[in-house]
């Protein structure tokens, strides 16, 4: 018996698009297109590859599937060489035993031109021999094509990567159910769209592809519901088949073991991710042991003995499972939201120079001021870091070679004790800094700025007195500006990176620098309203420490903000997640910002011109970069004086025209 589904509508639409683009129904060679078999020219450029499974038929349990390929203009793509299909079958929840989760089983995998027929009209036909087949179960076809160095049959037309999954009933009709727990879009909030999820292990781009392949046909530890949790925390380290080590350190630092970083509830009535909540509803031994590695269920180690999943839900009901995995994050956010800070920075001239007074008010969630004296014993650390010149700070982390000045760090409170350089005045924490190196009226250096971090001791929900063994939480940070002249302060631009992009990976309660400082959480408290009336939270306060002269290694760790963020996030020697794209962090490139910058410390005691230093934070691994940049007037790893003198002589932007979607763009 032959059963035919047949998503002919999509095929007919594509055929119609081609027909409408032509004068008649025929191609350039004068041949007419047959119904459902469009004539006309094929695509000679493929900037975007679209794939669809348009037809599935079965004969004696063997599926024949038709894949249709078009480019960004809906023109059929002929001559694909790197095209493949993986088939999988979905066993429903509980079908293999009470409590077991739904599971994909890979049933076929073919690729390459020998595995399909190119019908020369944009369609490709695969006939698969399945290792097992049950017509009552959902059947998935995972289609992959293109990628690095991939071309059409002409050998020159490049083909970008594309991966899709299409699910059907076992008879080729619309699937009645599927397993859709985490979306591809959730993964690409951290992993780069259009890049392999892990270039060290494979060349695949979507978690749907990974889930289709890492199925019940593999060993338990390689199955997706176990593996995906394993690689996102540090509980267990392992090596893949290529000898690459996976520790989970980067992933844990990003998502902080917060299940809801990945298990994101879709919008109500969207019809998407209908099983997103299965992480709480269907607890299994296979999934739980990916994080709880000290448990051996069958041996009764670390848990009551059990041989299967039939009784898991009896104790681990959905509400309790969610509560135990997320309550800590909920409580932390609630605590952070209870308190805020307001700060002012006021400078006055004195006979010997100047006095700059920093005043900090702690407020409650309602915005009302809280008397500082009542909070003193609950403060583990109240830290201020003050610098001068927001757009290009002139005080180094260590003494700057330009003026011998370094940032001013004051712990107004440490472990419940008020510092001798601080006081409480009218319920506010106050400290005064003498003789900051202010510049001329109207210059960037007429402005001082203080970045303030606060850590409060607590028991998880309420504040407690600080002491040995007492936990603390980093609270919202604050940023204050002030001028010696009394004129409006200069502020650093925030149109390049919006902290909302950082939150998409790091989450909203990410405590930065807690190990070395008070730590802080970046929120709207640091924001400024832009010309469009939008609240923008920038990373501008970070330059108080991440100065042009670097941080504690004086350039040895690429500590200047312009380089540090790139070196941490790039695919170079410092890269955490491979393949990140500029647009994942940047709103825009503010190239005008380079006009107010000088030398940046690029290695210990050595400096480079600002454009070359910024680009070099990613491209330092390229042997061709240094001579190319120096040929355009740049100084790389030279003296402070030489790099500073040449800072505005670089001619990079005469040719280069970088933008967030293509930072390699050049002017033609």
Image (tube, helix red, strand yellow):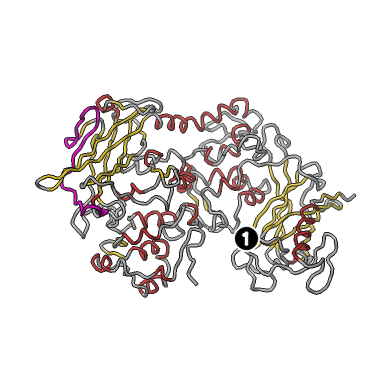
Note whether 157 is above or below 372 in the view shown. Answer: below
Residue stretch rendered in magenta on the structure: 419-444
Kindly indicate the quadrant of the structure image that contains residue 25: bottom right
Query: Looking at this view, is 333 or 348 the one in front?
Result: 348
Kindly indicate the quadrant of the structure image that contains residue 38: bottom right
Residue 425 lies within the magenta run: yes
Query: Looking at this view, is 541 or 306 the one in front?
Result: 541
The furthest residue to the left: 351
Q: Secondary structure at mark 1?
A: loop
Image check: 488 left or right of 303? left
Query: Looking at this view, is 314 or 575 the one in front?
Result: 575
Note whether 578 is above or below 30 in the view shown. Answer: above
Q: Position of residue 602 (x, y in %)?
A: 32, 62
Image label count: 1
Q: Position of residue 211 (x, y in %)?
A: 64, 48
Query: Looking at this view, is 553 or 474 the one in front?
Result: 474
């Amino acid at each position: 018996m032959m059963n035919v589904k047949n998503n002919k509508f999509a095929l007919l639409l594509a055929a119609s698009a081609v027909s409408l683009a032509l004068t008649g129904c025929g191609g350039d060679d004068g041949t007419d297109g047959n119904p459902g078999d469009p004539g006309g020219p094929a695509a000679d450029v493929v900037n975007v590859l679209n794939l669809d499974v348009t037809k599935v038929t079965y004969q004696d349990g063997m599926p024949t599937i038709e894949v249709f390929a078009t480019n960004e203009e809906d023109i059929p793509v002929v001559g694909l060489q790197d095209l493949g299909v993986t088939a999988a079958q979905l066993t429903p929840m509980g079908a293999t035993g009470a409590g077991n989760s739904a599971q994909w089983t890979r049933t076929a995998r073919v690729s390459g031109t020998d595995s399909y027929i190119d019908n020369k009209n944009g369609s490709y036909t695969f006939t698969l021999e399945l290792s097992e087949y049950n017509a009552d179960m959902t059947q998935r076809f995972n289609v992959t094509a293109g990628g690095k160095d991939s071309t059409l049959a002409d050998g020159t037309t490049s083909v970008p990567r594309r991966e899709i999954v299409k699910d059907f009933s076992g008879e080729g009709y619309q699937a009645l159910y599927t397993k859709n727990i985490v979306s591809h879009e959730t993964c690409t909030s951290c992993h780069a769209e259009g890049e392999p999820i892990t270039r060290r292990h494979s060349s695949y781009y979507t978690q749907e592809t990974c889930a289709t392949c890492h199925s019940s046909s593999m060993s338990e530890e390689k199955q997706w519901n176990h593996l995906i949790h394993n690689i996102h925390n540090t509980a267990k380290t392992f090596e893949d088949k290529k000898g690459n080590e996976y520790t989970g350190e980067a992933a844990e630092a990003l998502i902080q073991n917060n299940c809801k970083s990945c298990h994101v509830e879709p919008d109500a009535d969207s019809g998407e991710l209908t099983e997103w909540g299965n992480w709480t509803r269907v607890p299994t031994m296979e999934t739980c042991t990916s994080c709880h590695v000290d448990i051996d269920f069958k041996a009764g180690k670390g848990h009551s003995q059990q041989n299967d999943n039939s009784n898991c839900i009896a104790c681990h009901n959905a509400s309790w499972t969610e509560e135990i995995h997320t309550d800590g994050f909920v409580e932390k956010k609630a605590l952070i939201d209870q308190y805020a800070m307001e700060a002012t920075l006021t400078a006055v001239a004195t006979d010997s120079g100047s006095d700059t007074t920093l005043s900090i008010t702690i407020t409650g969630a309602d915005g009302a001021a809280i008397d500082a004296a009542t909070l003193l014993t609950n403060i583990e650390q109240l830290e201020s870091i003050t610098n001068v010149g927001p757009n290009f700070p002139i005080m180094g982390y260590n003494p700057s070679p330009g003026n011998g000045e370094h940032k001013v760090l004051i712990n107004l409170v440490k472990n419940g004790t008020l510092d001798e350089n601080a006081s409480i005045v009218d319920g506010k924490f106050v400290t005064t800094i003498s003789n900051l190196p202010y510049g001329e009226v109207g210059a960037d250096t007429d402005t001082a700025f203080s970045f303030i971090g606060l850590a409060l001791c607590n028991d998880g929900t309420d504040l407690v007195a600080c002491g040995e063994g007492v936990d603390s939480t980093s609270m919202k940070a604050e940023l204050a500006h002030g001028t010696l002249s009394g004129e409006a302060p200069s502020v650093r631009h925030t149109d390049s990176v919006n902290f909302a992009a950082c939150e998409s990976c790091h989450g909203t309660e990410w405590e930065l620098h807690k190990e070395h400082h008070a730590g802080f959480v970046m929120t709207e408290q640091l924001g400024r309203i832009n010309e469009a009336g939008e609240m923008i939270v920038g990373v501008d306060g970070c330059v108080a420490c991440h100065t042009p002269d670097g941080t504690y290694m004086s350039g040895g760790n690429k500590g200047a903000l312009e380089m540090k963020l790139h070196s941490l996030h790039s695919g170079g020697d410092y890269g955490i997640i491979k393949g990140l794209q500029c647009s994942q962090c940047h709103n825009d490139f503010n190239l005008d910002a380079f006009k107010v910058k000088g030398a940046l410390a690029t290695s210990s005691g050595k400096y480079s011109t600002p454009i070359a230093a910024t680009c070099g934070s990613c491209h330092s691994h390229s042997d061709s970069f240094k001579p190319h940049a120096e040929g355009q007037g740049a100084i790389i790893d030279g003296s402070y004086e030489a790099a500073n003198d040449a800072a505005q002589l670089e001619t990079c932007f005469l040719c280069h025209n970088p933008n967030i979607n293509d930072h390699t763009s050049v002017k033609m």
